[in-house]
């Protein structure tokens, strides 16, 4: 959704680096707990071109199940 918003396009599949979103520990090693949220930080060029910038994903801790 963030890539779509920044590019102003609906199909951004060619702009996303799938390897940066793969379920590997190193892809999600930059995170903080901010109050009741888990915030995953993705630096520039991790999931899209450097010019698109960095990303952050917020997940409510209450939504995370064991």
Image: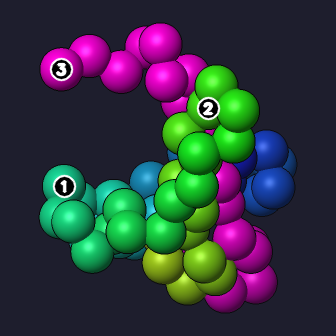
Residue sitting at x 18%, y 20% = 66
- Identify which residue is drawn at 49% across, 23% down: 61
Q: In this picture, is 6 found above or below 61?
A: below
Mark 1 surroundings: few (<14), some (14-19) or many (≥20) residues within 10 A: few
User: Which of marks 2 and 1 precedes in the sequence?
Assistant: 1
- In this rendered view, identify the residue nearer to me: 54 or 1: 54
Q: Earlier in the sequence, mark 1 or mark 3?
A: 1
Query: Which labelled disc corresponds to residue 66?
Result: 3
Which x, y percent locates residue 8? 81, 48
In this rendering, the answer to whether 20 lies above or below 38 is: below
Q: Mark 2 — residue? A: 37
Q: Nearer the viewer, residue 23 or 49?
A: 23
Would residue 49 be visible to someone looking at this image? no
Q: Is residue 52 magenta?
A: yes
Q: Residues within 10 Å of mark 3 (few under 14, many from 20)?
A: few
Q: Secondary structure at mark 1?
A: loop
Residue for point 21% across, 65% down: 25
Q: Is residue 33 left or right of residue 61?
A: right
* Image position of 50 with respect to 5: above or below: below
Identify the magenta region: 48-66
Under circle 3, the secondary element is loop
> Could you say where residue 14 lies in the image, as x and y percent from the top left?
45, 64
Which tag, 2 or 3, sits closer to the chain's start? Answer: 2
- Disc 1 and disc 3: Cα gap in Å? 17 Å
Question: In this rendering, would 28 be left or right of 11?
Answer: left
Q: For the residues labelled 1 and 2, say whether their Cβ atoms are less than 8 Å apart.
A: no
Tell me the residue at 18%/64% (across/down): 24
The quadrant the N terminus occupies is top right
């Amino acid at each position: 959704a963030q890539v779509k918003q920044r590019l102003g396009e609906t199909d951004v599949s060619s702009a996303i680096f799938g390897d940066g979103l793969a379920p590997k520990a190193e892809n999600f090693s930059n995170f903080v707990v901010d109050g009741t949220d888990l915030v995953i930080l993705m630096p520039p060029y991790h999931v899209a071109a450097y010019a698109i910038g960095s990303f952050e994903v917020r997940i409510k801790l209450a939504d995370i199940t064991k």
